[in-house]
Image (tube, rainbow, N blue to C red):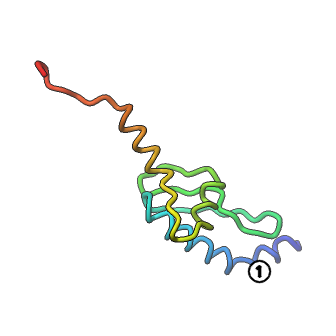
């Protein structure tokens, strides 16, 4: 029962954390449309999120990094993955080219 009271006492801080995470994530990635937080060891942490393009971010460490990173730091992690995927995808060409 004590854990429930502790979790409720920290809800305002969790809401502020979520707002920071959504803002900093959106600067470099598709917007998060849903976030799931879990309460462990007296603190709320993001466990996974769903982006606008329906991809799921299931790495809590990545979400925490976006949440805690200073605004001046760029975490272009998702962009780098997209660049790699574009390089691998073969491009169609017209016959005779």
Drawn side of residue 82 relative to residue 94, left or right: right
Quarter of the image containing the N terminus? bottom right
Instruction: From the top left corner, tell me how far across and down residue 53 is, in percent.
Output: 41, 53
Residue furthest toward the front?
72
Quick check: 67 above or below 5?
Answer: above
Residue furthest toward the right?
2
Quick check: 12 above or below 35?
Answer: below
Q: Which residue carries the number 1 mark? A: 9
Q: At x 46% / y 44%, what residue is drawn?
A: 81
Q: Quadrant of residue 7?
A: bottom right
Instruction: From the top left corner, tell me how far across and down residue 66 is, in percent.
Output: 57, 62
Q: How many marks?
A: 1
Q: At x 11% / y 18%, what residue is drawn?
A: 96
Drawn side of residue 47 relative to residue 22, left or right: right
Quarter of the image containing the C terminus? top left
Instruction: From the top left corner, tell me how far across and down residue 91 is, in percent.
Output: 26, 30
Instruction: From the top left corner, tell me how far across and down residue 84 is, in percent.
Output: 42, 39
The crowd level at tag 1 (other Cα within 10 Å; few <14, some 14-19, many 20+) is: few
Q: Quadrant of residue 26?
A: bottom left
Q: At x 60% / y 50%, what residue is drawn?
A: 58
Residue 33 seen in the current view: no
Residue furthest toward the left?
96
Q: At x 51% / y 67%, what residue is drawn?
A: 24
Q: Quadrant of residue 31?
A: bottom left
Residue 96 seen in the current view: yes
Quick check: 4 above or below 97?
Answer: below
Drawn side of residue 6 relative to residue 16, left or right: right
Q: Secondary structure at mark 1?
A: helix
Nearest the eye: 62 or 32: 62
């Amino acid at each position: 029962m004590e854990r429930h009271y502790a979790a409720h006492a920290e809800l305002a801080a969790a809401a502020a954390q979520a707002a920071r995470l959504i803002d900093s994530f959106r600067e470099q990635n598709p917007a998060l449309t849903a976030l799931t937080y879990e309460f462990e060891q007296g603190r709320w942490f993001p466990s996974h999120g769903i982006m606008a393009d329906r991809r799921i971010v299931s790495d809590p460490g990545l979400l925490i990094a976006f949440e805690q990173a200073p605004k001046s730091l760029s975490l272009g992690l998702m962009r780098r993955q997209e660049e790699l995927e574009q390089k691998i995808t073969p491009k169609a060409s017209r016959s005779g080219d």
